[in-house]
């Protein structure tokens, strides 16, 4: 009788998925920095360059916000995969959806930076916060796929640990949805709430 894949082979497949995912996260944050640059003529003076650099603060702020959010997403992704000892098609597909969204992060980031000080501020912030609602939804789908087949979870994981992770994913989705809703009323408060989410994920989740 043909034996199934060994535990080492299963862990190797999971590691391949994690390695590929890490690469996408790495590329995403690298592309964020490419959006930062100063376009100025060669005849510019020191004051011209200084003025041009100072004008870039909205882009830099958007970069910092996105970098931290992607960093926290990567940490969350790593924590989620620590609960898995193998993968299946559902996990790989939902993980692919998440990575597709992560790779897109330079687009909403640049949009936020370019329109932060314009009359299109509200639309820019709504678009930016809606993007992270999609990220949270993708995480929730990934975790649902992982828990839908308990055989792929690590041995010894307790029901309490599963419920805790599920609760954290639900909190992230609900909070990001609220932040997006607030953006329709006051974009600056919405961005401030995004900073508050950092405190939650770093200090509590």
Image (cartoon, rainbow, N blue to C red):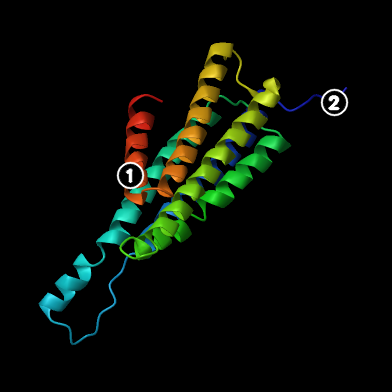
Residue 158 position (above or below residue 69): above
Q: Residue 85 is drawn in which quadrant?
A: top right
Q: Position of residue 200 (x, y in %)?
A: 36, 29
Residue 159 position (above or below residue 170): above
Res. 31 visible in picture: no
In the picture, the disc for residue 189 is 1
Real-space Cα separation, disc 2 to disc 1, in angstroms: 60 Å
Q: Is residue 203 left or right of residue 126?
A: left
Residue 22 position (above or below residue 57): above
Q: Position of residue 194 (x, y in %)?
A: 36, 41
Label 1 secondary element: helix
| Residue located farthest toward the front when viewing the structure as drawn | 185
Of residues 166 and 7, the one nearer the viewer is: 166
Residue located at (39% from left, 50% from top): 66
Q: Position of residue 176 (x, y in %)?
A: 46, 39
Q: Residue 134 is drawn in which quadrant?
A: top right
Tag count: 2
Q: Is residue 25 left or right of residue 141?
A: left
Res. 77 visible in picture: yes
Q: Crowding at label 2, few (<14), some or many (≥20) Cα neighbours within 10 Å?
A: few
Closer to the N terminus: mark 2 or mark 1? 2
In the picture, the disc for residue 2 is 2
In which quadrant is the C terminus drawn?
Answer: top left
Residue located at (55% from left, 50% from top): 101
In which quadrant is the N terminus drawn?
Answer: top right
Residue located at (48% from left, 54% from top): 127
């Amino acid at each position: 009788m043909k034996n199934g894949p060994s535990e080492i082979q299963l862990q190797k497949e999971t590691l391949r998925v994690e390695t590929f995912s890490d690469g996408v996260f790495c590329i995403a944050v690298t592309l964020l920095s490419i959006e930062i640059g100063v376009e100025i003529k060669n005849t510019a003076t020191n004051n011209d360059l200084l003025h041009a650099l100072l004008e870039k603060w909205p882009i830099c702020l958007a970069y910092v916000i996105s970098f931290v959010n992607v960093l926290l997403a990567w940490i969350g992704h790593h924590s989620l995969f620590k609960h898995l000892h193998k993968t299946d098609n559902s996990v790989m597909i939902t993980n692919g959806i998440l990575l597709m969204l992560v790779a897109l992060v330079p687009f909403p980031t640049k949009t936020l930076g370019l329109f932060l000080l314009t009359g299109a501020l509200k639309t820019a912030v709504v678009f930016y916060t809606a993007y992270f609602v999609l990220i949270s939804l993708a995480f929730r789908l990934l975790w649902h796929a992982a828990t839908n087949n308990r055989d792929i979870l690590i041995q010894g994981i307790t029901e309490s640990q599963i419920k805790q992770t599920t609760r954290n994913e639900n909190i992230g989705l609900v909070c990001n949805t609220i932040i997006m809703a607030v953006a329709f009323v006051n974009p600056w408060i919405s961005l401030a709430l995004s900073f508050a989410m950092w405190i939650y994920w770093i200090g509590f989740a």
